Image: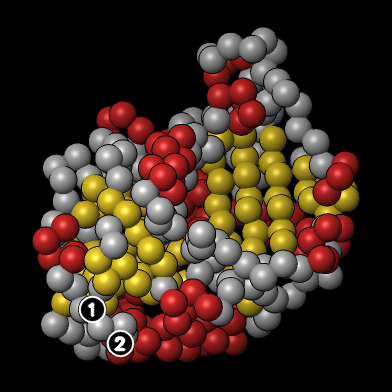
């Protein structure tokens, strides 16, 4: 079984230091209360970011999404963007990290006075945790590709739980992942409420048909930073790209398919529901991967 977050084991991660509300401590000493609203209710927002040569890729875009999400659920971050940047800088320095690093930034509404739902019971302020790991995606996924299975669990309507919220409440996606695993696949391909192809349980989803790149309208998926960078790169480099509704019919008949995410960048898809995608040749995906690597190099150089 493979996942888009599969990385080579790195023994340095056994002794990483983790940021917890201003303290940076060994992972074995990093603790959060059982009364924390994130543990108790999934009441929190998180971001995944990647460090390249000392630069957090597209930090501003990630922070825009993070602060917008916190505002949506009326959660006080407790610091501004510069404060988050400093906390991440301190955590990276404590771990002597400069590249091939993945960060999970997590903010919850904090410790509750009583074990009940109401947000007003969180009176002590938010809990901020920053986990950074030495993490490099495995190479074999780039050649073998990932296997998807269409799952019955769908992406939700915005008035239920807006999929654009990168919330700690990931149960919808976890159920989809379990359904895919039961079907013998690596990840679940999720449909939207109208039955159109949307995203996987962990990543945004693209197909390539006759030289055109298609992805969902974006109405029901996480507004992925890497997703948007791929769309922008296509537009800037003469690759036809469309955000549109499409069904499994077009998906099964695609020439190529790939996933996007901060960790794996662009991960090829080998098969969906046991059906091979294309011939295994992936020229458009390869071009986009090359353009993205160039974008990262330019971005790091500009920020250094």
Q: Residues within 10 Å of mark 1 (few under 14, many from 20)?
A: some
Task: Say above or below: 72 vs 260.
Answer: above
Task: Say above or below: 275 vs 54.
Answer: above
Q: Using the image as rendered, state which of residue 55 and residue 258 is in the foreground.
A: 258
Q: Which residue is mark 2?
A: 281
Q: Residues within 10 Å of mark 2 (few under 14, many from 20)?
A: few
Q: Is residue 77 left or right of residue 216?
A: right
Secondary element type, mark 1: loop
Q: Is residue 153 left or right of residue 124?
A: left
Q: Which residue is mark 1?
A: 278
Q: Is residue 253 left or right of residue 36?
A: left
The image's colouring method is: secondary structure
- Residue located 49% across and 30% down the image: 74
Gap between marks 1 and 2 measured at Cα: 7 Å
- Residue located 44% across and 48% down the image: 181
Secondary element type, mark 2: loop
Task: Say above or below: 241 vs 238.
Answer: above
Residues at marks 1 and 2 touching, judged by CB atoms closer than 8 Å: yes
Residue 280's spot in the image, x, y percent? 31, 83
Q: Can you see residue 85? A: yes
């Amino acid at each position: 079984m493979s996942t888009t977050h599969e990385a080579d084991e790195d023994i340095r991660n056994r002794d990483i230091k983790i940021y917890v509300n201003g303290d940076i401590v060994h992972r074995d000493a990093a603790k959060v209360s059982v009364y924390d609203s994130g543990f108790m209710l999934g009441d929190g927002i998180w971001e995944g970011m990647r460090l390249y040569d000392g630069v957090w890729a597209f930090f501003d875009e990630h922070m825009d999404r993070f602060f917008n999400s916190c505002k949506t659920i009326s959660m006080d971050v407790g610091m501004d963007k510069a404060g988050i940047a400093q906390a991440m800088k301190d955590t990276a320095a404590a771990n002597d990290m400069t590249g091939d690093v993945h960060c999970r930034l997590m903010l919850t509404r904090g410790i509750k006075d009583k074990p009940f739902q109401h947000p007003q019971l969180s009176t002590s302020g938010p809990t901020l945790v920053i986990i950074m790991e030495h993490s490099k995606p495995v190479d074999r996924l780039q050649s073998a590709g990932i296997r998807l299975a269409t799952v019955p669990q769908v992406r939700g309507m915005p008035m239920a739980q807006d999929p654009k919220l990168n919330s700690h409440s990931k149960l919808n996606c976890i159920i989809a992942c379990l359904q895919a695993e039961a079907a013998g696949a690596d990840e679940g391909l999720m449909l939207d409420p109208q039955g159109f192809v949307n995203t996987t349980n962990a990543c945004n989803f693209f197909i390539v048909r006759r030289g055109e790149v298609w992805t969902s309208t974006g109405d029901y998926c996480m507004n992925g930073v890497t997703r948007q960078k791929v769309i922008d790169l296509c537009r800037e480099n003469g690759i036809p790209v469309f955000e549109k509704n499409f069904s499994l019919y077009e998906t099964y008949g695609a020439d190529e398919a790939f996933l996007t995410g901060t960790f794996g960048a662009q991960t090829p898809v080998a098969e969906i529901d046991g059906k091979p995608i294309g011939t295994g040749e992936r020229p458009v995906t390869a071009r986009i991967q090359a353009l993205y690597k160039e974008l990262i190099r330019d971005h790091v150089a500009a920020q250094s």
